Image (cartoon, rainbow, N blue to C red):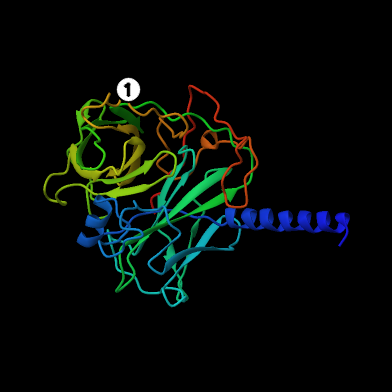
């Protein structure tokens, strides 16, 4: 085979790879989490449903694997504006039976790799095991999609896969750590210290116009729902508050979370009030008590998220869509030439709660 023929074949191969990545990026959809006692325990410990007998993955936080203990997350081609996927089981067939956890059999969470976008929605399943949902992707970039579920007779799992939406991404630095944030006129304050490798108690308090909110409404079986993502690899921590509806409807909601390592994390608190779900976001630094603490430990250098309030409608805002300065690879990861740009502002991500 001559040189020209080889180069032609190589170009065609690249076109096929990027074309496939583009197709997958068009079909991502909304997100939301699941609920039972076993599921809560697995996530609070940072596990993906793995136990002590599962040596290869027992130490890993959730969301880092696309396949675990025979179960695989497989995105599917879908019409524009829709996201579709299946979970295949150890026998290679689509899983069709799931346990209901936190009021839903499947929770789908998506976040941009630079943490400038976050959506939590609940897809619907067809009889063939295909899950479908309106796309939760706010704009161009590399997104991490997390499927949080418990197959009937199987372990509680959180599987993750990268999905690329073509376009220019202007990555922005993550907002610095703060103890208060606002969303739609609500102020949420954060009290507690994130300590790696041990249970950390975090208390989030909700007020509106300076008045404590004492009538929070249950959402997914609790008064608050918290997701934490680690900057860099987007390790997924999914924790729930102490107590249950009836124990007190605010203004404070407490969580016990185990941060698997020192580092920078982005917290997303979903809470429901006035029949609408809102999301408050925080940047948190996990460090040992003897270390320099949040102000002197690891710094938030590359993972952006919105510090301003998202719309309650669940629709992404145009200002929150970053742009890609490098060329996305076939695996959904930006090329090394994509460099975050310093920017005092931070894009507003879209949020969905279906």
Tell which residue pokes out farthest to the left in this image: 247
Q: Is residue 14 left or right of residue 210?
A: right
Please name whichever residue, 236 or 29, is drawn nearer the observer in this view of the structure: 236
Q: Which residue is under mark 1?
A: 296
Please, is residue 69 above or below residue 82 in the view? below
Quadrant that contains the N terminus: bottom right
Residue 115 drawn at (x, y percent): 45, 39
Residue 296 drawn at (x, y percent): 32, 22
Q: In this view, does 15 lie to the left or right of 342?
A: right
Residue at point 67%, 53% (across, down): 18
Helix, strand or loop for disc 1: loop
Residue at point 49%, 38% (across, down): 114
Please name whichever residue, 288 or 22, is drawn nearer the observer in this view of the structure: 288
In the rendered image, which quarter is residue 181 located in? top left
Residue 297 drawn at (x, y percent): 33, 26
Please, is residue 304 above or below residue 198 in the view? above
Residue 158 drawn at (x, y percent): 37, 57
Q: How many marks?
A: 1
């Amino acid at each position: 085979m001559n040189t020209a023929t080889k180069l032609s074949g190589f170009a065609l191969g690249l076109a096929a790879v990027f074309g496939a990545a583009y197709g997958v990026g068009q079909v991502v959809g909304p997100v939301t989490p699941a609920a039972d006692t076993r599921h809560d325990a697995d996530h609070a410990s940072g596990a993906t449903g793995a136990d002590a007998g599962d040596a290869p993955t027992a130490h890993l936080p959730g969301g880092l694997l696309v396949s675990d203990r025979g179960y695989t997350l497989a995105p599917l081609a879908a019409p524009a504006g829709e996201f579709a996927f299946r979970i295949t089981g150890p026998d290679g067939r689509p899983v069709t039976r799931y346990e209901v956890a936190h009021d839903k059999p499947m929770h789908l969470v998506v976040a941009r790799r630079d943490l400038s976008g976050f959506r939590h929605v609940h897809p619907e399943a067809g009889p063939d095991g295909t899950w479908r949902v309106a796309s939760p992707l706010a704009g161009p970039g590399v997104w991490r999609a997390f499927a949080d579920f418990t197959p009937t007779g199987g372990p509680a799992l959180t599987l993750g896969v990268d999905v690329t939406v073509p376009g220019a991404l202007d990555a922005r630095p993550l907002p610095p750590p703060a103890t208060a944030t606002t969303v739609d006129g609500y102020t949420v304050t954060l009290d507690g210290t994130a300590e790696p490798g041990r249970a950390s108690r975090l208390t989030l308090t909700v007020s509106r116009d300076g008045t404590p909110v004492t009538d929070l409404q249950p959402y997914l079986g609790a008064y608050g729902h918290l997701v934490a993502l680690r900057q860099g690899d987007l390790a997924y921590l999914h924790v729930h508050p102490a107590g249950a509806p009836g124990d007190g409807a605010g203004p404070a909601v407490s969580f016990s979370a185990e941060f698997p390592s020192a580092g920078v994390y982005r917290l997303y608190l979903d809470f429901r009030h006035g029949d609408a779900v809102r999301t408050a976001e925080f940047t948190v630094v996990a460090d040992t008590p003897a270390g320099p603490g949040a102000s002197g430990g690891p710094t938030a250098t590359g993972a952006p998220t919105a510090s301003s309030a998202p719309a309650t409608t669940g629709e992404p805002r145009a200002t929150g869509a970053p742009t890609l300065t490098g060329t996305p690879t076939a695996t959904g990861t930006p090329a090394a030439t994509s460099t975050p740009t310093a920017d005092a502002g931070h894009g507003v991500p879209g949020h969905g709660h279906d």
